[in-house]
Image (tube, rainbow, N blue to C red):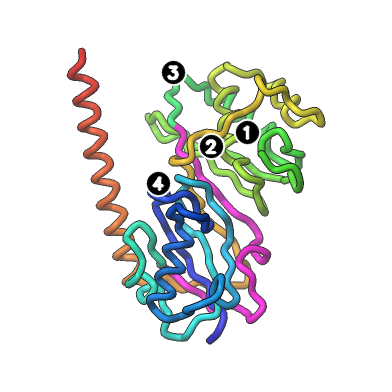
Amino acid sequence: MSMRAFRVAYDGTPYYGFQRQPDVSTVEDALFDALRALEVFDDGHRPTGYAAAGRTDAGVSALAQTVALEAPDWLTPRALNSELPETIRAWAHADAPEDFHATHHADSRTYTYHLHAPPAAVDDDRFDAALAALSGPHDFHNLTPDDRLTERAPTLEAVREEHGDYLVVTVRAGGFCRELVRRLVSLARAVGTGDASLEKIDRVLGPDPLPGHEGIPPAPPEPLVLADVAYPDLAFERDAEAAASTREIFDRRRIERRTAARVSGQLRDGME
């Protein structure tokens, strides 16, 4: 047994978040069930040495969630996938030092948010100005339910899809408070639509708590993806077969959702 880290992609929409919770289905439950089925561990609270890079909320997906544990040499991404549901796929691995911790040893985490923001509704210049104002070291106590460790230093940027209705927002930081990314997006969108002024950001980042009616709700979780977790000292090896099968699975899910969107479009248009 030696310490090994795995890159894991998942569609978070069927799950109540990553971390195990009583009486609901989570990504971590599925991972532990797979490891038990493979007899990597059979008792105890969790596998030896186990840790994960982050705890994504219900509905949030991931491309590069990273989990690490003491694993036998034969435990490859392909082997792990043999017991995982199709919504969760391992696609790369790296040998790690004995004392490696997937949470504490991450240099940075990167999220992307696919924001539906038609140009007629959201002004890109105002949106970018909001992202710039929210970037850098601040105390985000008004943008998280956490009551401690709320000082963070994120960088935020957005790219509009060419001739498209979506802004792809990238948020990077060493770590995040609960719901912070979704509330950052929500506040930037409010500024972009004109529902909030840039001056509101100063109040949000100020020392005083916002009154309830001025609070910033989190944006919906489904458009959010944990895109990357950086470990400078790890060299991940992509499992070609596991990655190819993962691409096929998620491409099929993409087509299914595009088809469902067409059906919804027909139902909408048929009412005219």
Residue stretch rendered in magenta on the structure: 91-115
What residue would you read off at disc 1? 131
Percent of width and height locating residue 11: 39, 52
Of the residues tagged 4 and 1, which is closer to the observer?
4
Up-down relation of residue 114 to residue 70 (above or below): above
Neighbour class for label 2 at 10 Å: few (<14), some, many (≥20)? some
Q: Amino acid at mark 2?
A: Ala
What residue is shown with label 3? 120
Q: How many marks can you see?
A: 4
Q: Amino acid at mark 4?
A: Thr
**Residue at the extreme right of the image, as rendered:** 207
Q: Counting other residues with Cα less than 10 Å from the Cα at mark 3, is it few (<14), some (14-19), or many (20 or more)?
A: few
Spatial CA span between label 3 and label 2 = 17 Å
Label 4 to label 2: alpha-carbon separation: 23 Å
Q: Position of residue 76 (x, y in %)?
A: 41, 77
Which one is in front in this view, the residue at disc 4 or the one at disc 2? 4
Q: Which residue is mark 4?
A: 13
Tags 3 and 2 touching, CB below 8 Å:
no
Q: Amino acid at mark 1?
A: Leu
Q: Position of residue 74 (x, y in %)?
A: 41, 84
Secondary structure type for disc 2: strand
Q: Which mark is residue 158?
A: 2
Q: CA distance from mark 4 to mark 3?
A: 29 Å
Secondary structure category for the residue under label 1: helix
Rounded to the nearest whole Å, what is the CA distance between mark 2 and mark 1? 8 Å
Image position, residue 12 (x, y; %): 42, 50
